[in-house]
């Protein structure tokens, strides 16, 4: 099947997972919710597309109004929807974001969703064999057994074709228990080329608090290259050649929803554009900081022009 968005060439980046319609509380003291869009791998796809990469998203959504809204969103964003499956027997997932002293919290209406019914047999081989990066996450594995199998099958297919795989643990303990999550995430980490956990996820998964101890644990478990995301404190990049800290940016953050997804999408977009890892990391770090300055996972994701303007004003 050819790309449906008119872009020349097939997708450079493919992401796979579950999109969720978002209702984000804009005032902690009031019962008002702003409708937006979320779902970690959809957020990453949009972030990569806003930086100029050719991106396709692999998922299932319901044959419902929310599925229509997503298809329209991806088309507007230039994300290739050629392989999105519409499921007449299941709904598009929904989540609510509330904000409190401990940051943001997610509440889900997603059990039995269309994406949780993804199967390895659904996987389109063309984009997985033609892309340069596949991006997947622990959420896609947590939402159901067949979705988990689908993630493993996609990783195998992309790797056999010579693509690289990036993986965000995105640990959601409302979706699966820690022991099962750890077993699956550790197995997946060892299959992937780039592991992108948040420090909170990595602490839960490893049992260590110290970033160096966490990174030692990742490499002992088979990871090859790790970016440990530290939220407002930036990130640490680690591979066989060493470890390097990327400082955070001070911005007027109001909502960190999707910041890690923006980081992943921006990083992969700049890697496929040819940036060296340190340049791509500085860029992704700036993009992730900017996305925290507005509410919602998607609306505040910056464009390339906005990231470049920010970097030229602040430096990396
Ligand atoms: O990373 C942000 C995502 O977590 C959010 O958009 C919702 O994908 C989501 C999830 O399942 O929690």
Image (spheres, grey):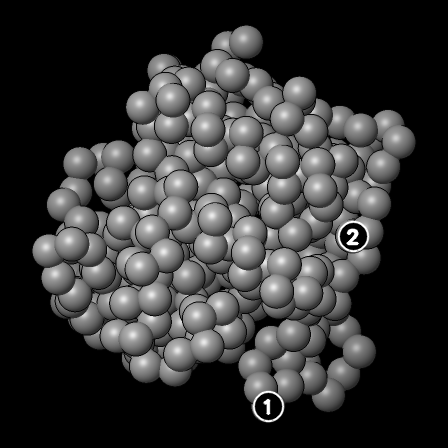
| Residue positioned 41% across, 72% down in the render | 199
SS for callout 2: loop
Helix, strand or loop at label 1? It is loop
Above or below residue 275? Residue 220 is below
Residue 251, horizontal then vertical, whole percent: 35, 77
Q: Is residue 218 visible?
A: yes
Q: Which residue is mark 2?
A: 110
Tell me the quarter of the picture where residue 272 sits: top left
Which residue was labeled with disc 1?
101
Distance (Cα) linking label 2 and label 1:
26 Å
Q: Is residue 248 left or right of residue 69?
A: left
The quarter of the picture where the C terminus appears is bottom left
Q: Quadrant of residue 76?
A: top right
- Number of numbered tags placed on the structure image: 2
Residue drawn at point x = 68 percent, y = 65 percent: 177
Q: Position of residue 14 (x, y in %)?
A: 45, 32
* Ligand 1 neighbours mark 2 (CB distance < 8 Å): yes
Q: Nearer the viewer, residue 96 or 223?
A: 223
In this rendering, the answer to whether 124 lies above or below 63 is above
The N terminus, quarter of image = top right
Q: Where residue 191 sits: x, y (%)? A: 40, 41
Q: Kindly give the residue lying farthest to the top in the view shown.
A: 1
């Amino acid at each position: 099947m050819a790309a449906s968005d008119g872009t020349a060439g097939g997708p450079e980046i493919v992401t796979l997972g579950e999109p969720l319609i978002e209702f984000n509380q804009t005032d902690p003291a009031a019962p008002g919710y702003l409708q937006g869009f979320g779902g970690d791998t959809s957020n990453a796809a949009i972030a990569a597309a806003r930086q100029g990469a050719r991106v396709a998203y692999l998922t299932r959504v319901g044959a419902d109004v929310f599925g229509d809204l997503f298809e329209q969103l991806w088309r507007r964003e230039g994300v290739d929807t050629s392989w999105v499956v519409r499921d007449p027997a299941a709904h598009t997932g929904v989540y609510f974001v509330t904000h409190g002293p401990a940051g943001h919290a997610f509440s889900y209406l997603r059990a039995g969703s269309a994406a949780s019914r993804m199967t390895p047999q659904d996987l389109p081989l063309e984009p997985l064999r033609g892309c340069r990066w596949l991006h997947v996450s622990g959420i896609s594995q947590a939402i159901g057994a067949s979705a988990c199998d689908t993630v493993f099958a996609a990783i195998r297919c992309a790797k056999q074709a010579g693509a690289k795989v990036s993986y965000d643990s995105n640990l959601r303990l409302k979706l699966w228990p820690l022991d099962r999550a750890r077993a699956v995430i550790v197995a997946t980490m060892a299959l992937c080329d780039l592991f992108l956990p948040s420090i909170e996820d990595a602490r839960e998964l490893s049992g260590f608090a110290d970033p160096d101890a966490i990174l030692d644990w990742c490499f002992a478990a088979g990871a090859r290259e790790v970016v440990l995301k530290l939220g407002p404190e930036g990130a640490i990049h680690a591979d066989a050649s060493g470890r390097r800290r990327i400082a955070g940016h001070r911005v007027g953050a109001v909502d960190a929803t999707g910041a890690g997804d923006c980081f992943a999408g921006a990083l992969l977009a700049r890697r496929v554009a040819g940036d060296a890892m340190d340049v791509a990391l500085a860029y992704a770090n700036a993009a992730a900081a900017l996305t925290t300055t507005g509410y919602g996972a998607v609306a505040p994701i910056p464009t390339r022009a906005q990231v470049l303007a920010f970097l030229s004003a602040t430096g990396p």
